[in-house]
Image (tube, rainbow, N blue to C red):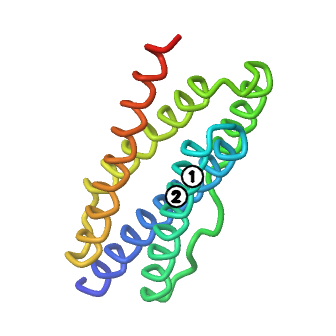
Amino acid sequence: MAAERSSQSVDTTVSTLNSLIQTSKDGENGFRAAAASVADSNLRHLFESYAQQRAEFAAELQREVRRLAEAPADSGHAAAALHRTWMEIKADLTGHDEAAIIAECERGEDTAVQSYRTSLNAELPADVRVMVERQFFEVKAAHDHLRSLERSHGEKD
């Protein structure tokens, strides 16, 4: 019975971490697409730094899954690829309108924040929970910063 419970616990942990890997990969790819779509060098640098942060999050989560002797996810969610395509089309149609691109990034971050919140509701080992919470706080900070940027860009229009 204890072995079965332990196996279920590992399965839950791996499933949760793989979902977060996909979320992190989605963020990485989305921020790279956003960076390529803006002319403002400060925004481009910000988006590139968030892309790098998400790549690091994914790598950290993948290491943890491997430590549990399981196979980590190596790509994002299919729906996120569709969102990136829409974001690229929208950028082309709006003439790479920075306010629209920021709004799309903030919308993607809404999804990431929700994904982390859901993951924190799962039963996770203490060391894994600490890592997920730390990443969550950084994702939430990025989300809040993007929301602030979205508001300030909206006021300029």
Residue marked by disc 1: 45
Label 1 is placed on what type of residue? His
* Residue at image location 43% in from the left, 31% down from the top: 149
- Classify the position of the N terminus by image quarter: bottom left
Q: Nearer the viewer, residue 56 or 157?
A: 157
Residue marked by disc 2: 49
Image quarter of residue 68: bottom left
Q: Residues within 10 Å of mark 1 (few under 14, many from 20)?
A: few
Q: Do tag 2 and tag 1 residues touch (Cβ < 8 Å)?
A: yes
Q: Residues within 10 Å of mark 2 (few under 14, many from 20)?
A: some
Where is residue 118 shown, x and y percent of the image? 33, 49
Q: Which of 96 and 65 is in front in this view?
A: 96
Numbered tag placed on residue 139 in the rendering:
none
Dot 2 lies on which element? helix
Where is residue 135 shown, x and y percent of the image? 34, 62
Label 2 is placed on what type of residue? Ser
